[in-house]
Image: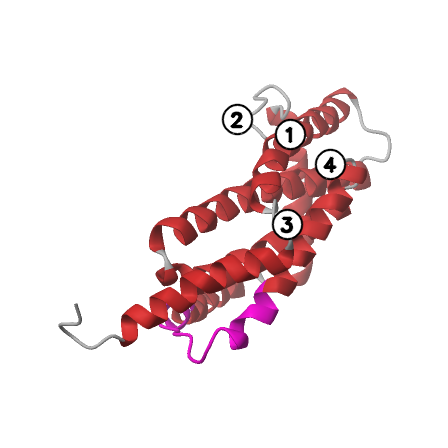
Amino acid sequence: MAEADPDALTPQLRERLVAGLEAERDEHVDPEDLAPRVEEAQGELEQSRLEIAGWELDGDWKTVSAGLERSYGRGREALGQVRETPDDDATVHEWRKRVKDLWYQLRLLRDSWEGVIAATVDELDRLSDLLGEHHDLAVLAEDVEARMPQPDGDAAQLVKAAGRRQRELLAEALPVGERIYTESPRRFSKRVGSYWEAWRSEESEPDGWA
């Protein structure tokens, strides 16, 4: 937000918001206990990341295709909802969750054709970041309005700036989504499945196969 509109979040308003957030944090968490809990959570997340990186998919395409087709279809449907109600923050956030679902699945399939699948994974990552910032701004505006039912000048300007930035983000995100979700779910699954089958066939060929 500060990078998009550096004048929107004044030092005084930032101080008020941070003070309120810190007060809420201290009500629920002992500050002295926070650091070790964060460190423990970071260790668990890193361990999970390493385990996921080593996952391998076994079996034929049927074990994968149904879930992939379902995720793609849900993302495509969510995109349609965003087109109809672009000002509904909850709808945009729901789309982001479906984008993340597909991103996670395709990351596991990227070996089937590194160039093509990796490019789609990268675009999904970019799309998720755009929609993630959109959601962060929705939460920020909601928090400001909750703390200041009648926002003063600075707060009101911040809420307006957040709305403008959200519209910019969505204008950038929609064309990316249109390209990713241009196919029917079945056609998308069949296309990725053809990469998978070709890759599995190559992997199973004996050394020296000509």
| Residue 126 - label | none
The location of residue 175, given as percent across then percent down, is 60, 34
- Mark yes or no: residue 46 visible: no
What residue would you read off at disc 3?
96
The location of residue 54, given as percent across then percent down, is 35, 72
What residue would you read off at disc 1?
171
Category of crowding for the residue at label 1, using alpha-carbon neighbours closer than 10 angstroms: few (below 14), some (14–19), many (at least 20): few
| Residue 3 - label | 2
Left or right? Give the position of 18 relative to 51: right
| Residue at figure coordinates x 45%, y 62% from the top left | 194
Badge 2 element:
loop
Label 1 to label 4, Cα distance in Å?
Answer: 19 Å
What residue would you read off at disc 4?
141
| Residue at figure coordinates x 69%, y 29% from the top left | 167
Badge 2 vs badge 1, beta-carbon distance below 8 Å? no
Badge 3 element:
helix
